[in-house]
Image (spheres, rainbow, N blue to C red):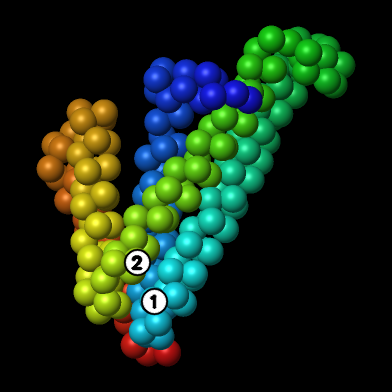
Amino acid sequence: MDLKEIERSIKDGSAIRYVVRGLIDGSLSTLGVVIGASGSADPSIIVSAGLGGGLANGLSNILGAFTAEKASLERDRINMEKKLLKKAGYLKNSILYKKGIKETMVCGFIDGVSTTLGSALPVLPFFFFKVDIALYLAIGITILILFILGIFIGKISKENIYLSGLKMVVGALIVSALCFMIEKII
């Protein structure tokens, strides 16, 4: 896997869903961590929890995306070998199979990196502002990022871009409300 393969996957659109999914996953899950840790009022704890959770989430997504995609690729290969009446493993040397493995690795990597980058966004305000202000900025940044991603998704799917953006904002508000409720209860 090299940078040219990653760039090609992004340009031809095959990896765009992993970029979008990763950014949504990283920003929303880290927002939940940030809100949960905000009760400590110690910015270093909030930043550590947010970045640590985001990094773990990103690495988990690399492994998860690679494992799930490879399992699907293997299932398809096995089914094709049965249809062709070939022995198990016959198609593992095919160009198509090797290309699928490379794409699986690239997409898994892109998913994880996008998740990690997305997770950094809600943490940024805690480097520059007091906790109470940073918390609301983190929510605002996450809402803005999700609204932009929603517009992007709406544009790709030929839906109303503002409605698509609004759906993403509602998701961020629900996550925020639930995390605040949990933080207050515990």
Q: Where is residue 154 in the image (x, y as percent from the top left)?
A: 22, 36
Mark yes or no: residue 122 visible: no
Asked whether 67 or 88 is in front, the reply is 67
Disc 1 crowd rating (10 Å Cα; few below 14, some 14-19, many 20+) is: many
* Circle 1 residue: 43
Asked whether 45 or 25 is in front, the reply is 45
* Circle 2 residue: 127
Horizontal placement of 1 versus 131: left or right? Answer: right
Q: Residue at x 54, y 32 (%)?
A: 107
Q: Position of residue 54 (x, y in %)?
A: 49, 58
| Tag 1 secondary structure | helix
Q: Position of residue 114 (x, y in %)?
A: 45, 43
Q: Residue at x 40, y 20 (%)?
A: 11
Disc 2 crowd rating (10 Å Cα; few below 14, some 14-19, many 20+) is: few
Q: Which amino acid does label 2 sit on?
A: Phe
Q: Is residue 119 above or below residue 183?
A: above
Asked whether 54 or 163 is in front, the reply is 54
Q: Quadrant of the C terminus?
A: bottom left
Kindly indicate the quadrant of the structure image that contains residue 91.
Answer: top right
Q: Report the Cα–Cα distance between label 1 and label 2.
A: 8 Å
Q: Residue at x 25, y 57 (%)?
A: 141
Q: In this view, does 14 lie above or below 42?
A: above
Q: In this view, does 125 lie above or below 115?
A: below
Horizontal placement of 31 versus 158: left or right? Answer: right
